[in-house]
Image: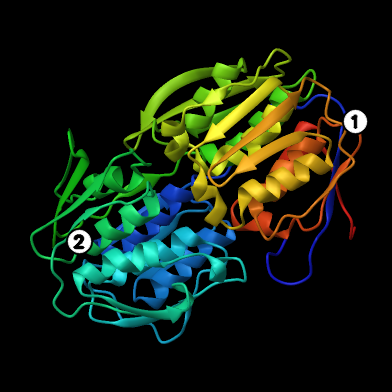
């Protein structure tokens, strides 16, 4: 599937229980960071289990453009020969980040304190997303950004010639902004400090520590304070990427709402800053169990089993949990449609500025499928119809958003009538194996152009 070019419509229809093992691809967040920090280390970093979706492959291409050597062996091992902190070369072409906000924001951070210039662009969706939330703190280091109105891509970033360390309080919870500031701080002298009032995913801090950076985290009255000492020599690593909990959410959710289902997702990463969806599903009454719990590369990992759960009920999701599950609200809304009672989600305005306005996209599609949805600027409420109670028969607009597309295809696995999406091509950005994986579990997915 291709996220560029002609749309690829797809239909999902109910066809019986989903059963088997869902081998989900590697964690996207960890994959991006493995490539970037590998490129900033001195020596060879070796990565197994890397997510080979378009977003991450775009980051690999960008690292080559900045001077690192990035290769893949036939057996799927990725090798990154880094150039060291501050060693990036100036790219001789525009950096195309495709659909990936993570790529754009983290790459800007990584180069912001190197005296080079780079221009970033993306697809139609990414070029509408706000970048000022990253370029504003990067300007404090001495970087200078010139882009379209509203701080949008295409954008040229001029790295600081004499960077200074920064103390920055995140105005809104954002792992991408936090990570961009920390990556910029690597090549600034002294200590760069990031303060967050709500904990966001901490893969960057864990990985920086693994690469040998001097980084500490403390919880104070002021918030969660992360302190990084700049200009270290990062040490190359052997990295095994766990399975992506955000990608796993789709086969898990489909199993929970489809009668008779029993699906195992092995080797899933369950970092507490990423596992909010699974806590929420359990509170709703989902039949989820963790087996073979262990630690892998500093990240908690387990095998997760999901079974059909006819007794799920709507709940109010704690707004403080949003940062740990912000990408999973679309698929949570699908599960909520099959619960009894209303599921209320607050503190989620970040969803308005993702690959699409995800609240609007999901609300419109769910209503078309027969589900009552209310919404406001930073909240929405899905009124569940109980197991087997969603009519379906909808055609959902995906707005170039991979998570919206996959969410509606999972919805169609359990509706009375089929559910159609207007374009499944964006799925390739994060989960290129989604269609064959779901088919292997027993889902009925049909491409219109076959």
Furthest-bottom residue in this view: 92
Picture layout, residue 235 above or below residue 57 = above
**Vertical comparison of 87 with 254: above or below:** below
Residue 320: x and y in percent read 41, 32
Position of residue 407 in the picture relative to residue 61 (left or right): right
Q: Residue placed at 71% from the left, 50% from the top?
A: 405
Mark 1 or mark 2, which is nearer the start of the sequence? 2
User: In front of the other: label 2 or label 1?
Assistant: 1
Task: Name the colouring of the figure.
Answer: rainbow
The furthest residue to the front: 376
Percent position (x, y) of residue 235? 21, 54
Q: Report x, y in % for residue 122.
A: 54, 72
Quarter occupied by residue 382: top right
Q: Which residue is mark 2?
A: 186
Instruction: Name the residue: 52% across, 65% down.
Output: 129
| Residue beneath the point at 32% across and 51% down | 171
The quarter in which the N terminus is drawn is: bottom right
Please tell me which residue lies in front, 185 or 55. Answer: 185
Residue 86 visible in the picture: yes
Real-space CA distance between mark 2 and mark 1, rounded to the nearest whole angstrom: 54 Å
| Residue 208 percent coordinates (x, y) | 25, 49
The residue at the point 71 percent across, 36 percent down is 373
Q: In the rendering, which numbered label is found on residue 416?
A: 1
Q: Secondary structure at mark 2?
A: loop
Taking the image as drawn, is residue 436 in sight? no
């Amino acid at each position: 599937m291709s996220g560029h070019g002609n749309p690829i419509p797809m239909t999902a229809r109910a066809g019986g229980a989903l059963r088997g093992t869902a081998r989900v691809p590697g964690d996207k967040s960890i994959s991006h960071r493995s490539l970037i920090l590998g490129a900033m280390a001195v020596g060879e970093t070796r990565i197994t289990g890397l997510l080979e979706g378009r977003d991450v492959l775009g980051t690999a291409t960008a690292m080559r453009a900045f001077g690192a050597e990035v290769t893949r062996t036939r057996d799927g091992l990725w090798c990154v020969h880094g150039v060291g902190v501050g060693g990036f070369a100036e790219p001789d072409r525009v950096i195309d980040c495709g659909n990936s906000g993570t790529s754009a924001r983290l790459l800007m951070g990584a180069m912001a304190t190197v005296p080079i210039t780079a221009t970033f662009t993306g697809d139609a969706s990414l070029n509408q997303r706000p970048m000022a939330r990253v370029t504003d703190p990067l300007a404090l280091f001495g970087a200078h950004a010139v882009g379209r109105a509203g701080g949008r891509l295409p954008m040229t970033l001029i790295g600081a010639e004499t960077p200074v360390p920064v103390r920055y309080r995140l105005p809104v919870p954002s792992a991408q902004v936090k990570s961009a500031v920390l990556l910029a701080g690597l090549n600034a002298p002294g200590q760069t400090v990031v303060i967050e009032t709500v904990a966001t995913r901490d893969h960057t801090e864990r990985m920086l520590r693994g690469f040998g950076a001097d980084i500490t985290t403390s919880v104070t009255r002021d918030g969660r304070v992360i302190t990084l000492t700049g200009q270290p020599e990062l040490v190359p690593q052997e990295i095994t990427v766990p399975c992506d909990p955000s990608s796993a959410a789709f086969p898990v959710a489909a199993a929970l709402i489809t009668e008779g289902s029993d699906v195992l997702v092995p080797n899933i990463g369950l970092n507490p800053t990423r596992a909010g969806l699974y806590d929420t599903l359990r509170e709703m009454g989902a039949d989820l169990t963790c087996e073979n719990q262990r630690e892998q590369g500093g990240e908690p990992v387990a095998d997760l089993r999901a079974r059909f759960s006819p007794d799920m009920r709507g709940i109010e999701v704690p707004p403080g949990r949003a940062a740990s599950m912000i990408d999973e609200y679309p698929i949570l809304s699908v599960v909520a449609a099959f619960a009894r009672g209303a599921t209320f989600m607050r503190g989620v305005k970040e969803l308005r500025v993702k690959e699409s306005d995800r609240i609007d996209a999901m609300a419109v599609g769910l209503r078309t499928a027969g589900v009552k949805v209310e919404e406001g600027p930073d909240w929405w409420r899905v009124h569940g119809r109980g197991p087997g109670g969603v009519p379906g028969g909808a055609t959902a607009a995906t707005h170039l958003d991979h998570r919206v597309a996959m969410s509606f295809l999972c919805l169609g696995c359990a509706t009375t009538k089929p559910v159609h999406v207007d374009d499944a091509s964006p799925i390739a950005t994060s989960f290129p194996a989604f269609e064959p994986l779901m088919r292997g579990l027993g889902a009925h997915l049909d491409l219109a152009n076959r």
